[in-house]
Image (spheres, rainbow, N blue to C red):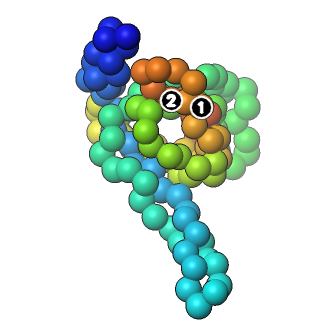
Amino acid sequence: MNYFKALKKTIPILWTDKVKITGTKPVVKNHITNNVSTTIVENEPAKVILKGQSAGNQSFYGTDQYDAKLLIRNGINIPAGAIIYVTDQNGQTSKYKRASKGYTGYYSHQELAMTRDEKA
């Protein structure tokens, strides 16, 4: 079990991407519930794994769309539909949306499925 605790601390050191995750949270004011935009984490180490890119799927409007998976530490509650901004080791930032709820079944990290969908 101690090996797993060390693994939880070591793996994020290897991740070179930094993420900012925004989502909404319910806020009750005068008995009315509204969803308010909030930052869940910022400057958090993570790793993006590309699931598939296909130049043949480019549309007339030049969208840059592909599926990816985000590896990030457990302990962060990431709701479905969160917006994820990933800055890679070269300083390039990509926006991902339509994220799934985090799958926390791994001891060392959680995974989220997400889609990059920006104008090229």
Proximity of marks 2 and 1: CB atoms separated by less than 8 Å? yes
Picture layout, residue 7 above or below residue 87: above
Per the model, the C-alpha gap separating discs 2 and 1 is 5 Å
Q: Nearer the viewer, residue 74 or 70?
A: 74
- Mark 2 sits on what residue? 110
Picture layout, residue 32 above or below residue 18: below
Q: Secondary structure at mark 1?
A: loop
Picture quarter with the N terminus: top left
Q: Residue furthest bottom?
A: 30
Q: Position of residue 69 (x, y in %)?
A: 56, 29
| Residue found at x 33% / y 34% | 45
Q: Nearer the viewer, residue 13 or 61?
A: 13
- Mark 1 sits on what residue? 103
User: Can residue 31 be seen from the camera position used here?
Assistant: yes
Amino acid type of the residue that numbered disc 2 sits on in the rendered structure: Gln
Amino acid type of the residue that numbered disc 1 sits on in the rendered structure: Tyr
Q: Residues within 10 Å of mark 1 (few under 14, many from 20)?
A: some
